Amino acid sequence: MPGLALTAIIAATGFLLREIPGVSVFSPMILAIVIGIAFHNLFGTPAMAKAGVVFSLRRVLRLAIILLGLQLTAAQIAEVGATGIAIIALTLVSTFIFTVRLGRMLGVERKLAELIAAGTSICGASAVIATNTVTRAPDEDVAYAVACVTVFGSIAMFTYPLLPGLLGLDAHAYGLWAGASIHEIAQVVAAAFQDGQAAGEFGTVAKLSRVMLLAPVVLSLGLMATRRARRKGQDQMTAKAPVPWFVLGFIAMVAFNSAVTLPTEAKGLIVMATTFMLSMALAAMGLETDIAKLKAKGFRPLVLGLAAFLFIAAFSLVMIKLVG
């Protein structure tokens, strides 16, 4: 209970800080991990809170990702259309592969490169921590990856609204570009609605369709981790696939939300609860992160994050232009 209370207080503080003018551009999840890191490195995480912090990082996170499925329906995916889904999927896969391979060339550790790739190509911080359930990287790697997607996603959020006229993008094309390439859901909403209601609504739906691809990516990474373990000659138990059961729950919730129409008020509460639980998970991540270890990672992962950001922006834009 002490650890759960601590992560909940930090998450609530993240929500409260967003009331300050200028801070609202950052999601509560990002603010929560920053507060968690500051608390841990200034005061230290109390020993009595450790069990609750781990619980938030594991169980609360998985429940939040399952509930994330209630923000997406099959009908919304249909609105994006086959061409839009193809652009989103191809952009995601290409960005992930590009980031992992460039990470190898730059000498960035494989697990950290995979986390940056997931955060950039899928849905920011929530994709980073979901992917880590199978990647199993150190907490400092997760914090670094979250920092990368936060910095470059924020840059996209401020720069994208300046570009539709310059690039000749109508509301539909701009919304698809924002949804297919900006990192966090909140960042997509902020950037897309700057170009009007139509662009904002389509960008949000495109982004949620991209979030749907979190499930196959995490499952695929789990299978790849198993194959790597077996190639290294590890025993059967060690090489057992880390089955992300919560991803199946996520898919089930999408199916449920497609079949049953939930009241608007209930959906609002679910979105709030999901964001709060994800903020608790990131607060827990911050409470286990040492700044000294972050510094030891150097600048190469940051360069990788920048390259991944530029790649996803350019690749998705070219695809949208090609299909008209």
Image (cartoon, rainbow, N blue to C red):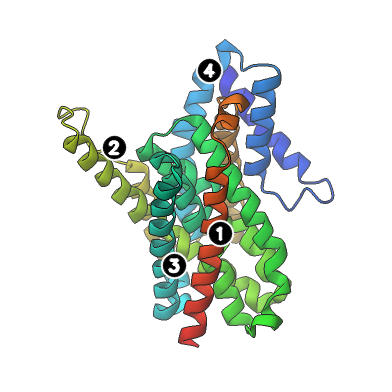
Q: Picture coordinates of residue 141 (x, y %)?
A: 50, 35
Q: CA distance from mark 3 to mark 1?
A: 12 Å
- Which element type, helix, strand or loop, lies under badge 4? helix
Task: Find the distance from the CA under tag 3 to the CA under tag 2.
Answer: 26 Å
The x and y percentages for residue 177 are 56, 72
Alpha-carbon span between mark 2 and mark 4? 23 Å
Residue 91, labelled with which disc? 3
Q: Quadrant of residue 48?
A: top right
Residue hosting label 1 = 309
Tell me the kind of residue under disc 2.
Pro
Q: Quadrant of residue 197?
A: bottom right
Q: Position of residue 83 (x, y in %)?
A: 41, 80
Point out the residue furthest to the top here.
47
Q: What secondary structure is found at the residue carrying circle 3?
A: helix
The first of marks 3 and 2 along the sequence is 3
* Number of other residues with Cα within 10 Å of mark 4, as a class: few under 14, some 14 to 19, many 20 or more: some
Query: Which tag, 1 or 2, sits closer to the chain's start?
Result: 2
* Mark 3 vs 4, N-terminal side: 4
Q: Evaluate whether residue 270 shows in this view.
A: no
Residue linked to disc 2 = 242
In the rendered structure, which amino acid carries the disc numbered 4?
A: Lys
Q: Amino acid at mark 3?
A: Thr
Q: Give the camera-side residue of 78 and 290.
A: 290
Please state if 58 lies on the left or on the right of 173 as rendered. left
The residues tagged by marks 1 and 2 sit, at their Cα atoms, a distance apart of 29 Å
| In this rendering, the label closer to the viewer, 3 or 2 | 3
Give the label, 3 or 4, closer to the camera: 3
- Mark 4 vs mark 1, CA separation in Å: 35 Å
Q: Is residue 273 above or below residue 260?
A: above
